[in-house]
Image (tube, rainbow, N blue to C red):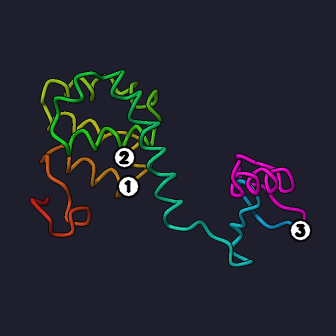
Amino acid sequence: MTMQARLRKMLSLHEGRIPHAYQDSLGYWTIGVGHLIDKRKGGRLPEEIIDALLDYDIKAHTRPLYEALPWLHRLDEVRQAVLCDMAFNLGVNGLLKWKNTLRFVEQGDYSRAAAAMRSSLWARQVKSRAVRLVKMMETGQWPKEITDGEGPEV
């Protein structure tokens, strides 16, 4: 066993391995193995950890989505991303309840799918997210704030 592995094991033993946010013995928010995230003490998550967690979450949401909707692979990248974003937000099971919208998407009737998205309670709740996703569904184009000038944009 390497020193790194032993140190990991020792710190886990001393600090505990907590898979959720918790308050340490001094009341500061912490996660994992004693990783301070409490802003009051300068704690934070490093960008690379945020990206690693996001990549993990993207896989966790998209894998079951593609299993439930095998036709999703046939869509263009932008419309796949719209449904992946919605699954991330609503949960895969939550998105799968959108029977009419998903039927319109599968049929390629993107304007009706967008209209159904626009008129939903979800759209009123998530506001600008819905506006962006509806436009992406309608046009099949990435918005400018996503592409940063690298290709076709909405």
Q: Looking at the picture, does residue 29 appear above or below residue 78?
A: below
Q: Amino acid at mark 2?
A: Ala
Q: How many marks?
A: 3
Q: Which residue is the extreme one toward the left?
A: 152
Work out whether mark 3 precedes mark 1 in sequence or the reverse, and give the earlier one: 3
SS state under label 1: loop
* Residue behind mark 3: 26
What residue is drawn where x is 42% and y is 43%? Answer: 58
User: Do the CB atoms of the residues marked 1 and 2 lie less than 8 Å apart?
Assistant: yes
Q: Looking at the picture, does residue 77 appear above or below residue 93?
A: below
What residue is drawn where x is 42% and y is 51%? Answer: 126
Q: Looking at the picture, does residue 79 appear above or below residue 144?
A: above
The tag on residue 127 is 1
Instruction: Say which quarter of the image contains residue 106.
Output: top left
Q: Looking at the picture, does residue 120 appear above or below residue 53?
A: above
SS state under label 2: helix
Q: Amino acid at mark 3?
A: Leu
Q: State which quarter of the image contains the C terminus.
A: bottom left
Stretch in magenta: 1-26
